[in-house]
Amino acid sequence: MMPAMDTLATPANIASLIARNLVPAVGVLFLGWSAGNLLVLYYLDTILSAAVVMLLIARHITGLGKAGQRRRPLEGPLNWIGGTLIVLVYAGATVYFELFPDRALAWLNPKESKPDHSA
């Protein structure tokens, strides 16, 4: 049986949450940090977090660590290369769709994506 999680919002937990969220704002406003750089860091953090969740789902789907069995880590270089490729394809596709949405979605309506030179 798993122990119950401590979900109490203590003053120390609330202060820590507020401080962690104020650091970027204080950095941009008073320390000359670049807001653009912070946005890129937040974006990459989101992409990598989603990639980790995707790998955990892939681990669940492939049966690594069935219920009641000892979980085994990725074994051998091929498993690590495969996992890395999954993350790179996901992250690359996500960044491509964000940077070039017109090109990435052109296959939905190919007639409109080709210029008309008949005139």
Image (cartoon, helix red, strand yellow):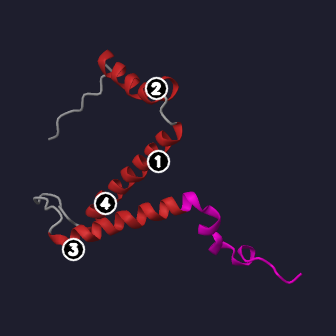
Q: Nearer the viewer, mark 1 or mark 4?
A: 1
Picture quadrant where residue 89 is located: bottom left
Give the label, 2 or 4, closer to the camera. Answer: 2
* Residue 92, position as x, y percentages in the image: 45, 64
Q: Earlier in the sequence, mark 1 or mark 3?
A: 1
Counting every numbered tag in the picture gives 4
Mark 2 residue type = Leu
At mark 1, the secondary structure is: helix
Amino acid type assigned to the residue bearing label 4 in the image: Leu
Q: Indicate which disc, 2 or 1, sits on the residue closer to the N terminus.
A: 2
Residue 43 image label: 1
Q: Are marks 2 and 4 in contact (CB under 8 Å)?
A: no
Quadrant location of the C terminus? bottom right
In primary-sequence order, the first of circles 3 and 2 is 2
Which residue is disc 4 drawn over? 55
- Residue denoted by label 2: 31
Q: Position of residue 22 (x, y in %)?
A: 44, 25
Q: Which residue is mark 3?
A: 78
Density class for disc 1 (Cα within 10 Å; few <14, some 14-19, many ≥20) is few
Closer to the observer: label 3 or label 2? 2
Q: Amino acid at mark 3?
A: Leu
Seen from the viewer's position, the closer of residues 59 and 88 is: 88
**Residue at horizontal 37%, vertical 50%?**
49
Quote the CA–CA distance across marks 2 and 4.
37 Å
Q: Nearer the viewer, mark 2 or mark 1?
A: 2
Q: In this rendering, would 84 be left or right of 64?
A: right
- Callout 4: 10 Å neighbours few (<14), some, many (20+)? some
Q: Earlier in the sequence, mark 2 or mark 4?
A: 2
- Secondary structure under the numbered disc 2 in the rendered image: loop
Q: How far apart are the two marked residues, 1 and 3, measured between alpha carbons?
A: 29 Å
Q: Amino acid at mark 1?
A: Tyr
